[in-house]
Image: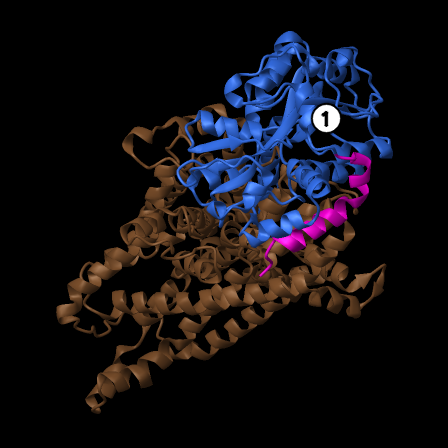
Chain colours: A blue, B brown
Amino acid sequence: MLKKTSIVAMACVLAGSMLFAGCGGGEKKAAAPKADGNKLIIYTSMKESLIKGIVTGFEKKNPGIKVDYQSAGAGKLMAKIAAERQSGKILADVIWTSEVPDFYKMKKEGILANYKSPVFKEIVNPFDDYDGSFHAARLGTLGIIINTDKVKTAPTQWSDLNNPDLTNGRAVAPPARSGTAYRANAGRQTQFGPDFFKDLKANGARVGKGSGQVIDDTASGELSASLAVDYITNAKIAKGAHIKMCYPPEMLVVPSPVAIFKDSKQLDAAKKFVDYLLGAEAQQLVANQGTIPVREDVKIDPKFQLPSPKEALKKGIKVNYLEIIDSKEKTVKEFSDLMQVKK
Amino acid sequence: MASGTIKKDSGFGIAQVILFISIAILVIFVAWPVLLILFNAFFVDGKFNSMDFYKVLTEPETFQALINSLIIASMTTVGSTIVGTFFAWLVTRTDLPYKTFMKSLFLVPFMLPSFIGALAWKMLLSPHSGYINKWFMSAFNTTEPLFDIYTYHGISCVEVMYLFPFVFIQVCGALERMDPTLEESARISGAGLFTITRKITIPLVLPSIMSGALLIMLYSMAHFGTVAVLGIEQGIYNIPTLIYEKIHESAGSFASIRTGTVLATVLIVSAACIIWAQQKVLSKGHYQIIGGKSFRPMELKLRGLRYPLLFFCLAYIGFTIVLPTVVIFMVGGVETYGLPLTWENLSLNNYKYILLEDDVTSDAIFISDTLGLAAAFITMFAGVMISYVIVKMKVRGKGILEFLGMLPFSVPGSVIALGVILAWSGQFGINIYNTVWIILVSYIARYMAFSLKANSAALEQVHDSLMEASRSCGASMWQSLKDIVIPLVRPGMISAFFLIFLPALRELTVSIMLYAPTTRTIGVAIYTLNEDGETVMSTALAGIALIIIVLGQMFINHLTKKASE
């Protein structure tokens, strides 16, 4: 009989602990966005510094709507969306990244809602085939950033990257991870031909870990220069990092589209968010971060040396997005094989 | 005991139910995910296909990862064994000053998670910007860095720094428990120190050295953090980092999952071999060491070397523990990475931001704490129950449970993570992928081994006669359980709880494969912040994690001291 009771006691204890864990878990879940709640969920590759202000402003203007956002690399978000689709339901209502080909792909797959925003006529549109599936909400730029302690003469041309002054020190983010980096590569490959990267490699360039990390590596002097995203760089400069942003005449302009998912239960709120994002107030926040807005009526601080949206589109390297969707995997692979040393 | 026979007759009694529950827990949490990995590695479209397994394995990328794992693990093992054995000998068999204190100092590296160590060493020794390298280059007016941390050597050195205690503890134990009369009789028979060491001491402690070395081998092969921080950028992948990359890039595409399962299978097989070899080595060495009796082994007089060696030990600790910790806290204090570490650049702003303003990091701290607590509670109680069945119950079918109970000891973290992805992401009706639950499930699987070990050890010491005595004195069943068994097992339960809670707090290998943007653990938050280029935030969070870990450890030490008094 001895065992029977002790066993029962233990089973009770075990059940108790499960129960306890259950409660603990419930609390945790409350912190994560719920699919069935009244919250608008945004997946974005914009960094905290940019998205937080916009969401706060939006919530202030629309007191009834609660917003939850997840900020992660474009690749990670697409992986998450793919996994969610497999399990039957996309949790996000709105997606805003810099990976243009992903948007064309999602449009083709028919998972984006068609919404022609009334604000559209006020913005500068980079997409010739606009049909309401997505809107550009920011024109990101990539420039060469240099470590001001190590590099004395700032590069003015892409070809300056091959200067011996910069040997041992360029990096670009791996395209599989970061949307912006991928687009940048595709752009330059069209413009300068495949030899561009080969020459870079010969001058000691390497692939960094992510579009953010190359900036810190440049600031620390681990790299003399790197290819970096505008607003992340400007945030670090504002904090006193010893780096400088340089723009060659052929600019790398990367639109960041925003889109609504067709199955969203928060369609109205999502539409309001897109309108707000394209409006003057949100675009001013975009510009304040040191990246190009999509509105001509928004002022960009001259210290960022950024052109106006229209000018940027004119100067930007032209890219045929439809073409690069199909060749994305190939380009990524070619690029990785060339640049990434696999030991 | 009489009850045993009664239950046998009843066929389906409460004992069977408990046995069944215990088996079910181990099968669901550990065996099934592992089986799914093996199944996915060898079966293509439902058909057995070993050729394809071979094909995936020999792809240049996969093959290189295997080789890298082996290279790094071998270098780490050799290095840790030398360092661990040397220091163990120093603190047990010589007259080094402050020996007990030094012994506890050498256990401190256990507290420092190796990926945080790797972060610190990255800042100290990256070829062009590491603080040591920069100092070296300017002091000697050269452009060649002193040491490049982004190499096989660099990775192995960092792993050695934080893994050598595995060998240290084992060898210390063996040297302390060694029968000194063996050495004395050799000496009386006229053998010199060298002969004694060669013929008596080394053969006696060799099994412990070997078993510690194998432990490190297993750990290093399946180790994610250091290689991820220092290797990926330079193209150095090992098995766990490649599994991570594959899962990460693929959005769950089948080809990458398969590569993952093939790599995981290699890990499972090597782990099984290592565990087997370790058992073999240990069983061979067992009879030569006297356990439980206190002998005073003779001590080597270091004479003039006493203080130089003490200084060497202190310098080693200073270099491997103090220096990286200081760098973590300093860099965590600067406004942005790359600024010189001067007083005017340092502030507490980052720490304030992380704790109070940033949701991602404060959530991560909360999630890790709750996950750790939940995993520790569940695993502790499940471990008591399973150990009770294994150690105390006589019931048919126990053999299966004993076999299953061995499993958690030999399954590496990244294997568990991949297994739970396969098992819990919807294919079998339950989809908890992208939630905290999947991390909880994997923590339970990962830490079951600790709980089983601590609880069986405690239960083995409770003799049946104690219960019988209390029963014959008239105590009720519940009374004797409450007053005898539980108090005796409690230290084991408490130690199991903390053996799980503290490692779970800083876990990286498993949670990095399972996290969703809202379910970052502390480890994941540190890693992703670093990956996203928020170096100073990442180090500041690492600093906070270190404080939590040290406080937790102090609390445990306090508790165990109280328990032993």
* Viewer-side residue, A306 vs B240: A306
**Would residue B438 be counted in the magenta stretch?**
no
Q: Name the residue under label 1.
A: A257
Percent coordinates x, y for residue A187 in the rendering? 70, 38
Percent coordinates x, y for residue B337 in the rendering? 42, 36
Q: Residue at x 70, y 49 (%)?
A: A194
Give the vertical position of A152 relative to B71 (above or below).
Answer: above
**Residue A113, quarter of picture:** top right
Percent coordinates x, y for residue B519 in the rendering? 60, 35
The total number of labels drawn is 1
Can residue B17 be seen here?
no
**Would residue A326 be counted in the magenta stretch?**
yes
Q: Give the range drawn in magenta.
A: A319-343
A259 sits left or right of B174 in the view: right
Give the vertical position of A167 relative to B358 (above or below).
Answer: below
Main secondary-structure element of the magenta-colored stretch: helix
* Viewer-side residue, A207 vs B361: A207
Percent coordinates x, y for residue A279 in the rendering? 68, 12
In the rendered image, the residue lying farthest to the bottom is B189
**Residue A115, quarter of picture:** top right
Q: Is the residue marked by circle 1 packed among few (<14), some (14-19), or many (20+) residues within 10 Å? A: many
